[in-house]
Image (cartoon, rainbow, N blue to C red):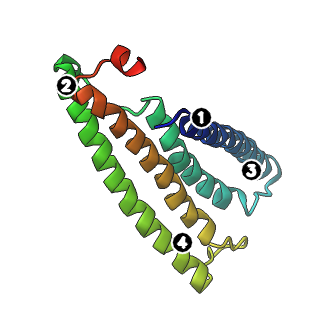
């Protein structure tokens, strides 16, 4: 992948990281506000639970690409770390390809869900009445980002599978 494309990808992930931090800060403040209003003043908010439920989905799907980028997903690598480098590269390639396939299916199905919610005007049955197209649209966006990161990881595994070292690639 070109250096410009990777810088652009890093920039996009930085934007997603900062928006995730802002969403988390907002969630913390709104949940604290709702708890204070509920227990101190017996006047709970009508919007906090609904908004924070959708923002939790945002954090889960949007943060997944960033976690994959930094190799931060939970996993057990005891056996993989003891394998030869080429076998590890093959496992990384297979994981990347399967991740791309999985994410492609979720982008496709999530896009259909969001489109149908938009076409039929689906809303949450609450006083806020949030249009469901917004939380549903988070699925294809988040899984598209995750799928691109899986593709980058798979492409990075190919030279290692061929036995090319980092020094040879940088020449």
Q: Earlier in the sequence, mark 2 or mark 3?
A: 3
Q: Residue at x 58, y 84 (%)?
A: 119
- Circle 1 packing at 10 Å, graded few (<14), some (14-19), many (20+), is few
Quarter occupied by the C terminus: top left
Q: Earlier in the sequence, mark 1 or mark 3?
A: 1
Is residue 103 visible in the rendered image? The answer is yes
- Per the image, the residue denoted by label 1 is 7
Q: Quadrant of residue 137?
A: bottom right
Q: Residue at x 29, y 29 (%)?
A: 159
Q: Is residue 16 left or right of residue 29?
A: left
In the drawing, what numbered circle is on residue 34?
A: 3
In the drawing, what numbered circle is on residue 114?
A: 4
Q: Quadrant of residue 10?
A: top right
Is residue 76 visible in the rendered image? The answer is no
How far apart marks 2 and 4 lie (CA) works out to 41 Å
The secondary structure type at the circle numbered 3 is helix
Q: Nearer the viewer, residue 15 or 8?
A: 8
Q: Residue furthest bottom?
A: 120
Q: Percent x, y for residue 143?
A: 46, 53
In the drawing, what numbered circle is on residue 86?
A: 2
Q: Percent x, y for residue 39?
A: 75, 48
Marks 3 & 4, CB-CB < 8 Å contact: no
How far apart marks 2 and 3 lie (CA) works out to 53 Å
How far apart marks 1 and 2 lie (CA) works out to 28 Å
């Amino acid at each position: 992948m070109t250096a410009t494309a990777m810088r652009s990808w890093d920039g996009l992930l930085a934007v997603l990281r900062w928006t995730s931090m802002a969403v988390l800060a907002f969630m913390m403040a709104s949940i604290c506000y709702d708890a204070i209003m509920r227990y101190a003043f017996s006047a709970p908010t009508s919007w906090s639970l609904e908004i924070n439920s959708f923002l939790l989905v945002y954090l889960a799907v949007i943060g997944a690409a960033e976690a994959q980028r930094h190799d931060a997903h939970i996993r057990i690598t005891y056996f993989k770390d003891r394998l030869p480098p080429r076998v590890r590269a093959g496992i990384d390639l297979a994981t990347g390809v399967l991740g791309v396939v999985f994410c492609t299916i979720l982008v496709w199905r999530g896009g259909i869900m969001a489109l149908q919610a938009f076409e039929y005007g689906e809303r949450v049955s609450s006083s806020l009445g949030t249009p469901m197209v917004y939380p549903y649209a988070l699925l294809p966006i988040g899984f598209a980002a995750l799928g691109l990161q899986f593709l980058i990881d798979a492409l990075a595994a190919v030279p290692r599978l061929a036995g090319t070292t980092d020094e040879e690639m940088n020449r």
